[in-house]
Amino acid sequence: MKTLNDYMSDPDIANEPMPWREIHAIRLKIHDETKDMTFQERKVYYEEAVTRFFASSGKPVPYAKP
C-alpha cells in the first residue's frame, strides 16, 4: 500500500502549493483504499476513520452506532 508521501510526490500534483498538494494526496489515498469497496464496506471504512479521529482528539464520537 502506498504511503501519503508516495502520493505527495505524484507528478500530477507536484506543482501544487503545499496545502493543496496535501489535500489532493489525501483524496488520492482515500480513493485508492475505497475504490473497490461496496457501499457497506465504504460506510464501515468512514465510520472507523471518524472514530479514530475523535479518539485521537480525546473527544466522544458525536453519533451512536446502531
Image: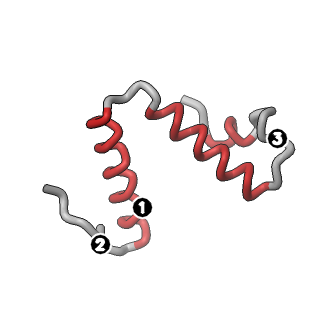
User: Closer to the N terminus: mark 3 or mark 1?
Assistant: 3
- Mark 3 neighbour class, 10 Å CA radius: few under 14, some 14 to 19, many 20 or more: some
| Image location of residue 15, percent across then percent down | 86, 44
Extreme front residue here? 39
Q: Which mark is residue 7?
A: none
User: Closer to the N terminus: mark 1 or mark 2?
Assistant: 1
Of residues 15 and 2, the one drawn nearer to the viewer in this rendering: 15
Q: Quadrant of the N terminus?
A: top right
Residue carrying label 1: 53
| Image location of residue 50, percent across then percent down | 37, 58
Residue at left offset 68%, top offset 38%: 7
Q: Quadrant of the C terminus?
A: bottom left
Q: In the rendered view, does 12 fall on the left or right side of 60?
A: right
Residue carrying label 2: 60
| Image location of residue 58, percent across then percent down | 37, 73
Identity, as a three-letter code, of the amino acid under mark 3: Ala
Find the distance from the CA under tag 3 to the CA under tag 2.
37 Å
Identity, as a three-letter code, of the amino acid under mark 2: Pro
State if disc 1 and disc 3 touch (CB < 8 Å): no
Find the distance from the CA under tag 1 to the CA under tag 2.
10 Å
Q: Quadrant of residue 63?
A: bottom left
Find the distance from the CA under tag 3 to the CA under tag 1.
27 Å
Residue carrying label 3: 14
Identity, as a three-letter code, of the amino acid under mark 1: Phe
- Mark 2 neighbour class, 10 Å CA radius: few under 14, some 14 to 19, many 20 or more: few
Q: In the rendered view, does 64 fall on the left or right side of 15?
A: left
Extreme bottom residue here? 59
Q: Judging from the image, what secondary structure is the residue with disc 3 in? A: loop
State if disc 2 and disc 3 touch (CB < 8 Å): no
Residue at left offset 58%, top offset 44%: 27
Q: In the rendered view, does 41 fall on the left or right side of 20?
A: left
Extreme right residue here? 15
